[in-house]
């Protein structure tokens, strides 16, 4: 719980988040904003259950606005910004690994925000920003915020003075920022020209793009320090809906079963889960789109291959279900296509597309890895081709009688040549039966 001494920090800290009229933080807001996050890091990570909606909404908005402001960060406060982002990353990794029912951020949005910090781009649309802002305002706030009633004009005057004097960072951070600048400029992608002083003061052709690269690189380093790559892979492996297809894939490899939708009822049942599947596939896509798959040790590679083949199996099941529905639509039972059906078809197309993109990412990573090598990439492609051939065989075996579940009807009594429609009249009243 926040203490009274930190209440002032919190009042200054949440003030920029209470308005959705802006898309990013201004330069004079960032120093105090990030300083408060670092000082209140323990409270953000460990707090009473009743404050979870407040802190989770705060983390969501803070992550979005910091990633949106990646190209507008003051150089003197870069270390503070990265420290604040590390606190936010730690909170979101905890919620992914240990879900909390009171948390206002769903797993999908947690992964979206993590990716935004590691890429340096905005992660939430304006509608979601308004939603999180409303939840932040309506949630139970820590006691320090209630006890501290600072006048808004006093805060604004303080911000004006900070903007003019640039005293948002403390003196130590400003003095040591020179060494951070030298480190950033000495990256292998940017050659150093002149001495260290020239390096610090020099202007790059596109400073905004360079700041985003530094922001993303430092956050990726923080994610690695927090063992985030391992945690994110574990999250992908334990997703509820994809786990079903993981078991089916393993059964197929073991030769015990190859489960795919075969009938219209099975296809319609599978289509009802498209939205949930797309949400989980999107989580995997966001994780695998980050450069965190290396090092490809045997155990880690086995986990990655299991995840990507499960996604591929999922997309094959989706394609099979759509094929069955399309075949059934040409039969007399065809019903009018509704807007909901078109929406479900859109979900299915997105699932297939993202699954193929995940496979391409993993295939490229394995092919370029010094640990795995080209032979592993060939094995991965062969496994995918074998799985696709199995599905193609299942599609070719589909017939109208199988889709409409009439296969058992014709085989119920092969020796009986009497038409079924002629049997009922004998049991009708007045047929002579007493």
Image (cartoon, rainbow, N blue to C red):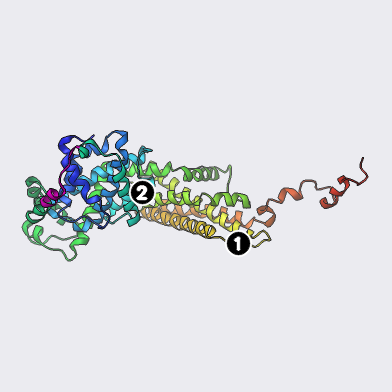
Q: Residue shown at 36%/49% (left/top)?
A: 109
Q: Which residues are magenta?
A: 147-158
- Label ID, residue 336: 1
Please say if the residues under marks 1 and 2 sit with CB atoms less than 8 Å apart: no
Q: Is residue 167 left or right of residue 243?
A: left
Asked whether, in this view, residue 312 is left or right of residue 81, the answer is: right
Residue carrying label 2: 109
Quadrant into which the N terminus falls: top left
Q: Please tell me which residue lies in front, 210 or 375.
A: 210
Q: Which mark is residue 363?
A: none
Q: Quadrant of residue 54?
A: top left
Asked which quadrant contains residue 42, the reply is top left
List x then y, in percent, for residue 374. 39, 54
Magenta stretch, overall SS: helix
Residue drawn at (23%, 36%) of the image:
143
What is the spatial separation of the Cα atoms under label 1 and label 2, in whole angstroms? 35 Å
Q: Position of residue 188 (x, y in %)?
A: 19, 57
Task: Specify few, some or many for label 2: CA neighbours under 10 Å numbering under 14, 14-19, or 20 or more.
Answer: some
Query: Does the magenta segment cover residue 364?
Result: no
Is residue 291 at least partly visible in the picture?
Answer: no
Image-based side of 308 in relation to 368, left or right = right
Q: Earlier in the sequence, mark 1 or mark 2?
A: 2
> Quick one: label 1, few (<14), some, or many (20+) residues within 10 Å?
few
Q: Position of residue 412 (x, y in %)?
A: 77, 46
State the residue in front, 227 or 390.
227
């Amino acid at each position: 719980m926040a203490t009274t001494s930190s209440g002032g920090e919190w009042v200054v800290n949440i003030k920029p988040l209470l308005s959705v009229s802006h898309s990013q933080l201004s330069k004079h807001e960032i120093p105090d904003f990030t300083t408060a996050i670092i000082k209140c890091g323990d409270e953000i990570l460990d707090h009473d259950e009743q404050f979870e909606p407040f802190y989770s909404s705060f983390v969501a908005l803070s992550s979005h606005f910091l990633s949106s402001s990646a190209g507008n960060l003051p150089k003197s406060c870069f270390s503070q910004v990265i420290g604040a982002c590390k606190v936010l990353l730690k909170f979101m990794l905890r919620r992914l690994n240990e879900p909390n029912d009171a948390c206002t951020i769903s797993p999908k949005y947690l992964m979206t925000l993590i990716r935004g910090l590691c890429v340096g781009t905005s992660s939430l649309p304006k509608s979601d920003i308004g939603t999180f802002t409303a939840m932040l305002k309506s949630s139970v706030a820590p006691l320090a915020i209630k006890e501290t009633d600072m006048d808004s004009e006093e805060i604004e005057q303080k911000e004006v003075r900070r903007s003019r004097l640039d005293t948002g960072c403390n003196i130590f951070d400003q003095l040591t920022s020179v060494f951070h600048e030298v480190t950033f400029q000495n990256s292998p992608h940017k050659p150093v020209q002149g001495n260290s002083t020239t390096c610090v003061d020099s202007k790059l052709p596109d400073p905004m793009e360079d700041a985003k690269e530094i922001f993303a690189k430092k956050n990726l380093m923080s994610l690695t320090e927090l063992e985030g790559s391992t945690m994110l892979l574990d999250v992908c492996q334990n997703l509820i809906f994809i786990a079903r297809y993981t078991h089916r894939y393993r059964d197929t490899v073991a030769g015990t079963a190859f489960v795919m939708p075969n009938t219209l009822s099975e296809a319609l049942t599978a289509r009802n889960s498209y939205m949930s599947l797309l949400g989980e596939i999107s989580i995997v896509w966001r994780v695998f789109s980050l450069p965190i798959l290396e090092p490809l040790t045997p155990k880690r590679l086995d986990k990655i291959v299991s995840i990507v083949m499960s996604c591929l199996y999922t997309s094959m099941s989706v394609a099979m279900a759509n094929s069955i529905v399309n075949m059934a639509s040409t039969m007399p039972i065809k019903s009018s296509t509704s807007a909901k059906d078109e929406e479900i078809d859109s979900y299915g197309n997105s699932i297939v597309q993202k699954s193929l993109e995940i496979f391409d990412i993993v295939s490229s990573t394995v092919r370029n890895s010094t640990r795995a090598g080209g032979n592993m990439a060939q094995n991965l492609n062969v496994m995918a081709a074998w799985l696709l051939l199995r599905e193609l065989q299942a599609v070719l075996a589909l017939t109208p009688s199988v889709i409409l579940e009439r296969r058992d009807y014709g085989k119920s009594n092969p020796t009986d040549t009497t038409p079924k429609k002629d049997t009922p009249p004998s049991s009708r009243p007045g047929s002579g039966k007493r």
